[in-house]
Image (cartoon, coloured by chain):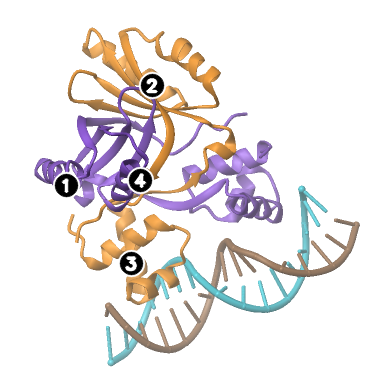
Chain colours: A orange, B purple, C brown, D cyan
Amino acid sequence: MSLDQYDRAILNALQKDSSISNLDLSKLIGLSTSACLARTKNLRETGVIKQFTTVIDEKKIGLDMIAFIMVVLSPLKRDVVDFFLEQINSIPQVLECYTIAGSRDYLLKVATKDMQSYKDFILDSLMVIPGVSRIEANIVINTDKRTLSLPIEE
Amino acid sequence: MSLDQYDRAILNALQKDSSISNLDLSKLIGLSTSACLARTKNLRETGVIKQFTTVIDEKKIGLDMIAFIMVVLSPLKRDVVDFFLEQINSIPQVLECYTIAGSRDYLLKVATKDMQSYKDFILDSLMVIPGVSRIEANIVINTDKRTLSLPIEE
DNA sequence: CTTGAAAGAGACACGTC
DNA sequence: GACGTGTCTCTTTCAAG
């Protein structure tokens, strides 16, 4: 995938605000509307653009608790892993799950309403999954930075 | 902020695909176009909807390295903290930064091109910030789940 | 790549019930 | 809240340079 300066400009602009009209976008990046539209369409079709989405203020919808949870899975065997990931994918409170290198196996990002529902999540949703032997929770006190704009290289 | 079932339906739909037209959205949630438009507008104005954005495939733009880095800041004093956060906010590779409870002070999510540029980031951007005494890196091997759809309660 | 034209669709404000 | 109307803007396609 090779992106030129125009493609990068389009991606940067769309990351900041995807509700921009093609007309404004073309003006912004310095292309004609037709060329701009064709590029945007192409970026979607080739999968560079995966999705257009909406960022919601978590606190305003009552999600006051964000936590990053490290999980050690044991034994780390195929069937245990598969079942774990299957469960994780079905739990809406788990926003993200990563396999990580090192002493802990998985990193989860979890959003819940409050401390009580967080506790319920840990006890009733997470610890009940077979193989989850040890967890290490990092509770978010403040979000200091959060951007969806990836560092697109020049 | 109190959201009824229609508001929640709108938010859920817009999280999945913000490029949906107001016409289709109104059909989906079972409201008239005018009522639907007024609600969406209201959600934007009250800040529940913060942003419309675009999700990009990191790998397709050459970002192959994602890491979560725990940072201990010492001394944890006002001026050290302020300068640290100022620097963090100016580094594009840092996508997210959270203040966390516990033994580590900050959690960063970082995206770089490869191992080499990751190393450069650690040495030249992160470790040079005054107060950054200890870091603990968790390198992402695989993204098992990643959703931008918050668990909106019924 | 650009410009220009033309048709279709949607946004959005305005009334009415 | 629903519905209809009208206007205006943008989208989208398709020419030709």
Instruction: Name the spot of residue A120 as percent of width and height, x first.
Output: 51, 14
Label 1 is found on which chain of the structure? B
Going from N to C along the chain, the mark reached first, 1 or 4, is 4
**Mark 2 and mark 4: span between their CA atoms?**
36 Å
Query: Which label sits in the foreground, 2 or 4?
Result: 4
Q: Chain of mark 4?
A: B
> Which mark, residue A38?
3
Q: Nearer the viewer, mark 4 or mark 3?
A: 4
Q: Position of residue A58 (x, y in %)?
A: 52, 38
Residue B148, compared with residue A131, is above or below; it is: below
Q: To which chain does the residue with label 3 belong?
A: A
Residue extending furthest left?
B116
Task: Classify 10 Å Cα crowding around label 4: few (below 14), some (14-19), many (20 and above).
Answer: few
Residue bearing the label numbered 2: A88
Residue at the spot 58% in from the left edge and 33% down from the top edge = A62
Q: Position of residue B92 (x, y in %)?
A: 27, 51
- Give the residue type that dot 3 points to: Ala
Q: What residue is disc 1 on? A: B113
Amino acid type at circle 2 is: Ile
Task: Identify which amino acid the numbered label 4 is placed on.
Answer: Asp
- The residue located at (20%, 46%) in the rendering is B63
Please check whether the numbered discs 4 and 3 fall on a single chain: no
Mark 3–mark 1 distance (CA, rounded to whole Å): 27 Å
Disc 1 to disc 4: CB gap under 8 Å = no
Of tags 3 and 2, the one toward the viewer is 2
Q: Amino acid at mark 1?
A: Lys
Q: Is residue A78 above or below residue A11?
A: above
Q: How far is disc 4 from disc 3 in space, using C-alphas?
A: 44 Å
- Please, is residue A30 above or below residue B103 in the view? below
The residue identified by callout 4 is: B82
Residue under disc 1 on the same chain as residue under disc 2: no
